[in-house]
Image (cartoon, coloured by chain):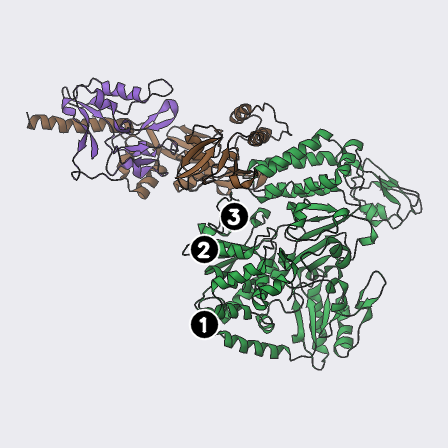
Chain colours: A brown, B green, C purple
């Protein structure tokens, strides 16, 4: 058990826990744009930064990203100190400078009282805010199909050599978790298209409804020891089959045991 | 042939010394990258040619040694005749015949090739008498200019690997760490963290694997200390790494060399191959239980990969992005294992500390900044090159003593230290001692040792703009304060240099700088605003002149200057040929005319005019 | 003492109280959510089968989750989906052979039965006790992680 203070309140945390987890448990709301429980914390957006100090520091303070800073005994944490607020404001201001037309960024900036950027507008060609969630999730899932390419201002998320990513299975995890919905995909006529790669959508052998891509299903079947037959029927039909199967058993037991 | 144990090493040392002592005279040709670019290879070829035709008693081509950088790059190509120490400067291939005839076959000195003291015109004959060298204390650079860069024999002859033998036979890892801690050796890459403490922490982490890495990325523009050491004394680096590996129980080491240093890679690779051949790398080194191997990992052209966590990602084959280091890489580094990462210069000091003892090392420098530091002295200083002085030497001693003062005796304006992470210091700070701590208080930092000297023709706004543009292109892009913040900071500095800024902009730049420093993920961002902030701190007036008067006093910022031809013009037409955009017109012996509309302010005309007829307004 | 959720289709009357109770128990923003239990036609006269997650010992959903968002709660025995970890790849929906991992289209999230954290409301409200959540003697059955 580790004891620390957050915004003046004494709280308890587990050894090795990150500050952000404790802060959220205390229902304190701070933004953490590049954070997702499924992947390791990244520390890229800097919005979750908090001010920390210790009794023996004589008032000197440090500023750390709470998503990556482990709890310490007697740590004193301030999530909304004036400097932290100023820092968050500057960050959203800088975000707005390069994404003046992205709704999620406009909303985030508005939360901190910033309606127009105070810097020179240099709009990015798309809504990608380089939070890295897509690449980190893809890597955690074991596909590593896309990556951050380039450096600095020219950095972008792309598949290798800008071509259709060979390792992508079309699971859509990247698109589902993109905070600005920049990753686009389409499901049409049994074909899914994402990252300029086409995938065959599996069709339920009973009702024809489309489920996940064949590539994803094959990858799961081979890698996680799940019979491929499971993926050939949709969940609606699976439920119906279950009820029919269980029904036959129940009916049999009725007949056997009156 | 394998060197079996320390006794065998001593025997080999004797044999190598005997082989080297075969020739009474030795010719040293500086083959550091600077002199090579200046034609040193042609000089070596010239020696080969001349000596194939003319036999000199007691001398042969074997005694022509290609060494690493002497440091006196301004005067290269350099040739030194040992043991006399005769120092020949600005040597050309056509001089070689005379050198062989006069200085090798006989003992005559070729005066025209000697260094000339600019203050009185006197010629100086010997290496040790040149103020450039006599004022230095060459410890990390001890082998540069002395031994053949690619020869393990010469390294062993000079006492190489004796420190390793001493460590393996008579010191425990804890004792090695204690010795390095006692020596006060601090990280020479710029961080200044006590090396012994780093090794201690690493060793204390319980793990089946520990790693030792050498940071040879040297990304600071204008810095070539590490390059010269890797090229000129690769074995010194290897031996330092071996001793560190022994201290922290590492069996695998890496040297991360930046893409742009092919000669360093070649020489390091040769050194590693030679060590492996004689058993100084591999299993059971010198008959002990210690096994260690080293691999070279090449960068791919990113300044940010000099940052320790980005470097380790790069070594592991991943994209070189730093991570927040709340859990330090000495605890969880390469492949999440405890890793010691030290700079080239730090490692090259280690064998000597083991050899001569920690106490000897603390007798140099100051109590909290022991030893020496290598600097690359560049810019508007007379003696540009590589130097090494004891910590605590003042900047005045370095710039005006060793450096020989400012070219053309122009007034000194400022010196930039620490590269893109550092700041500049004005004349009033010249008597500050150079060490890790003092310069930081003054708003700069010693950094890895880059020193850029500036005169009154350097614009401080332009300087800040340059460093910011460098950082903007080198930022990894992971975090917003650095990626977008430095970009905006650069844009605002451009506004100042073009005369479009207001005083409110200056305040905005200072505020944004503070936020970038607070909010950035790694050192690149955190120290990025330093050049801007230090130039504003000491040269605020210059910024205000740009803003209020839309004028650049140093005559640099293109939007704010005009080039004009005055009546000193003799009509020689040199500038007309120099002008790439045909902005100057005129006849022979007539005062030329400069068309302002076409002028791009490139300064070519200014550079070629011998009559001071071009003025910058 | 471990508990086990049991389904007895024999006495299910198809009243769908369980479905209603589940929807209300999993309300989102004050509105009824998606039910995790569906009494469906058993294929014979007056035979209904409440189809619900039976917290399989070797669950296909757990195997299919590449981010470890599905984990068994040792106290309740339920396999719980951690919404914060879920990346909405829909692998579990496709993998479950019983169709018990469901898509809440309205809120774009995946849901499954979590035994209401230890007191399943469906069992609570089932008028015929077709659904029960009762203790099993220790040693009788083993439950995997």
Q: Viewer-nearest of labels 3 and 2?
A: 2
What crowding class fits label 3: few (fewer than 14 Cα within 10 Å), some (14-19), or many (20 or more)?
Answer: many
Give whichever of B588, B189 is nearer the camera. B189
Give the CA separation, mark 2 to mark 1: 26 Å
Q: Is residue B316 left or right of residue B68?
A: left
Q: Nearer the viewer, residue A247 or B314?
A: B314
- Position of A242 relative to B610 (above/below): above
Residue B287 numbered mark, or none: 1
The dot on residue B347 is: none
Kindly indicate whether the residues beneath marks 2 and 1 are on one polypeptide chain.
yes
Dot placed on the residue nearer the N-terminal end, 3 or 2: 2
x, y percent for residue C12: 17, 21
Q: Secondary structure at mark 3?
A: helix
Task: Work out which quarter of the rendered image holds the C terminus of chain B and state it.
Answer: top right
Q: Do tag 3 and tag 1 residues touch (Cβ < 8 Å)?
A: no
The chain letter for the residue carrying disc 1 is B
Left or right for C103, reference B571: left
Q: Secondary structure at mark 1?
A: helix
Mark nearer the viewer, 2 or 1? 2
Identify the residue shown where x is 54% and y is 39%.
B478
Q: Horizontally, is B200 left or right of B31 in the view?
A: left
Classify 10 Å Cα crowding around label 2: few (below 14), some (14-19), many (20 and above).
Answer: few
Residue corresponding to mark 3: B309
Q: Of residues B129 and B315, which is closer to you in this image?
A: B129
Residue B502 percent coordinates (x, y)? 73, 29
Q: Quadrant of residue A176?
A: top left
In this rendering, the answer to whether A120 lies above or below A222 is above
Label 2 or label 1, whichever comes before in sequence order:
2
Residue B279 appears in view = no
Query: Do discs 3 and 2 belong to a common subunit?
Result: yes
Q: Which residue is mark 2?
A: B204
């Amino acid at each position: 058990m580790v004891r620390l203070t957050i915004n003046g309140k004494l709280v308890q945390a587990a050894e090795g826990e990150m500050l952000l987890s404790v802060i959220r448990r205390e229902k304190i709301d701070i933004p953490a744009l590049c954070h997702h429980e499924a992947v390791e914390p990244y520390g890229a957006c800097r919005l979750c930064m908090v001010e920390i100090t210790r009794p023996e520091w004589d008032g000197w303070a440090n500023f750390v990203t709470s998503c990556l800073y482990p709890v310490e005994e007697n740590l004193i944490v301030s999530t909304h100190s004036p400097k932290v607020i100023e820092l968050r404001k500057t960050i959203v201001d800088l975000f707005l400078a390069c994404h003046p037309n992205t709704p999620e960024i406009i909303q985030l900036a508005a939360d901190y009282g910033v309606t127009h950027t105070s810097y020179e507008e240099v709009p990015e060609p798309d809504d990608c805010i380089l939070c890295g969630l897509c690449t980190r999730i893809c890597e955690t899932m074991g596909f590593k199909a896309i990556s951050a390419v380039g450096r600095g201002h020219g950095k972008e998320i792309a598949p290798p050599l800008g071509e259709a990513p060979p390792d992508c299975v079309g699971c859509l995890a990247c698109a589902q978790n993109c905070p600005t919905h920049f990753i686009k995909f389409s499901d049409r006529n049994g074909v899914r298209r994402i990252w300029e790669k086409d995938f065959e959508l599996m069709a339920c052998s009973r009702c024809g409804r489309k489920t996940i891509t064949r590539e994803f299903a094959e990858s799961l079947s081979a890698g996680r020891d799940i019979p491929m037959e499971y993926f050939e029927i949709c969940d609606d039909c699976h439920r119906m089959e279950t009820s029919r199967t269980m029904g036959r058993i129940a009916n049999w037991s009725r007949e056997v045991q009156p | 042939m394998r060197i079996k144990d320390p006794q065998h090493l001593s025997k080999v040392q004797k044999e190598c010394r005997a082989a080297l002592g075969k020739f009474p005279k030795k010719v040293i040709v500086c083959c550091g990258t600077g002199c090579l670019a200046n034609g040193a290879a042609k000089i070596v070829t010239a020696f080969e040619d001349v000596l194939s035709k003319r036999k000199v008693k007691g001398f042969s081509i074997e005694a022509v040694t290609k060494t690493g950088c002497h440091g006196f790059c301004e005067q290269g190509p350099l040739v030194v005749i040992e043991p006399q120490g005769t120092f020949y400067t600005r040597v050309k291939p056509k001089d070689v015949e005379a050198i062989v005839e006069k200085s090798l076959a006989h003992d005559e000195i070729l005066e025209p090739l000697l260094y000339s003291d600019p203050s009185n015109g006197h010629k100086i004959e010997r290496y040790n008498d040149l103020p450039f060298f006599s004022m230095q204390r060459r410890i990390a650079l001890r082998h540069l200019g002395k031994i053949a860069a690619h020869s393990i024999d010469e390294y062993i002859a000079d006492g190489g690997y004796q420190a390793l033998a001493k460590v393996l036979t008579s010191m425990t890892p804890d004792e090695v760490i204690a010795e390095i801690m006692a020596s006060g050796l601090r990280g020479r890459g710029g961080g200044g963290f006590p090396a012994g403490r780093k090794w201690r922490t690493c060793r204390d982490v319980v793990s089946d694997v520990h790693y030792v890495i050498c940071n040879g990325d040297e990304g600071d523009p204008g810095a070539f200390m590490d390059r010269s050491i890797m090229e000129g004394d690769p074995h010194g680096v290897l031996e330092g790494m071996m001793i560190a590996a022994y201290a922290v129980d590492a069996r695998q080491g890496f040297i991360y060399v930046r893409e742009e240093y092919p000669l360093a890679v070649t020489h390091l690779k040769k050194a590693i191959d030679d060590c492996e051949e004689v058993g100084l790398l591999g299993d059971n080194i010198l008959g002990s239980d210690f096994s260690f191997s080293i691999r070279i990992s090449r960068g791919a052209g990113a300044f940010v990969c000099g940052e320790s966590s980005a470097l380790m990602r790069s070594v592991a084959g991943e994209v070189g992005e730093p991570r927040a280091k709340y859990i330090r890489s000495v605890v969880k580094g390469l492949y999440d294992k405890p890793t010691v990462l030290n700079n080239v210069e730090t490692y090259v000091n280690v064998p000597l500390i083991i050899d001569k003892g920690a106490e000897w090392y603390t007798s140099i420098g100051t109590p909290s900044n022991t030893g020496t530091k290598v600097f690359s002295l560049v810019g508007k200083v007379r003696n540009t090159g590589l130097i090494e002085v004891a910590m605590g030497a003042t900047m005045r001693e370095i710039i005006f003593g060793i450096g020989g003062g400012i070219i053309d005796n122009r007034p000194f304006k400022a010196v930039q230290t620490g590269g893109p992470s550092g700041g500049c210091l004005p004349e009033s700070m010249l008597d500050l001692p150079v060490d890790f701590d003092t310069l930081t208080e003054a708003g700069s930092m010693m950094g890895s040792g880059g020193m850029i000297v500036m005169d009154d023709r350097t614009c401080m706004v332009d300087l800040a703009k340059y460093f910011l543009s460098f950082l903007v292109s080198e930022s990894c892009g992971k975090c917003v304060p650095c990626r977008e913040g430095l970009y905006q900071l650069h844009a605002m500095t451009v506004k100042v240099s073009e005369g479009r800024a207001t005083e409110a902009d200056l305040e905005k730049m200072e505020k944004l700088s503070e936020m970038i420093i607070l909010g950035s993920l790694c050192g690149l961002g955190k120290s990025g605003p330093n050049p801007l902030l230090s130039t504003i701190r000491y040269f605020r007036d210059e910024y205000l002149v740009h803003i209020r008067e839309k004028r650049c006093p140093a005559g640099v910022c293109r939007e704010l200057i005009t080039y004009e031809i005055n009546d000193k013009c003799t009509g020689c037409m040199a500038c007309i040929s120099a002008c790439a955009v045909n902005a100057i017109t005129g006849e022979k012996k007539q005062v030329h005319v400069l068309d302002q509309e076409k002028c791009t302010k490139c300064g070519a005309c200014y550079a070629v005019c011998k009559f001071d007829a071009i003025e910058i307004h | 003492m471990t508990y086990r959720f049991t389904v007895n289709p024999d006495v299910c009357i198809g009243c769908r109280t369980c479905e209603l109770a589940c929807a209300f128990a999993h309300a989102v923003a004050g509105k009824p959510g998606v039910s995790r239990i569906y009494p469906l036609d058993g294929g014979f006269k007056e035979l209904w089968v409440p189809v619900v997650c039976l917290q399989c010992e070797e669950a296909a959903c757990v195997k299919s989750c590449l981010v470890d968002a599905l984990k068994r709660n040792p106290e309740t025995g339920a396999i719980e989906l951690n919404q914060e970890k879920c990346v909405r790849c829909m692998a579990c929906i496709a993998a479950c052979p019983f169709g018990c991992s469901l898509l809440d289209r309205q809120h774009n999230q995946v849901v499954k039965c979590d035994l209401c954290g230890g007191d399943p409301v469906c069992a609570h409200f089932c008028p015929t006790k077709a659904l029960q959540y009762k203790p099993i003697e220790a040693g009788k059955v083993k439950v995997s992680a």
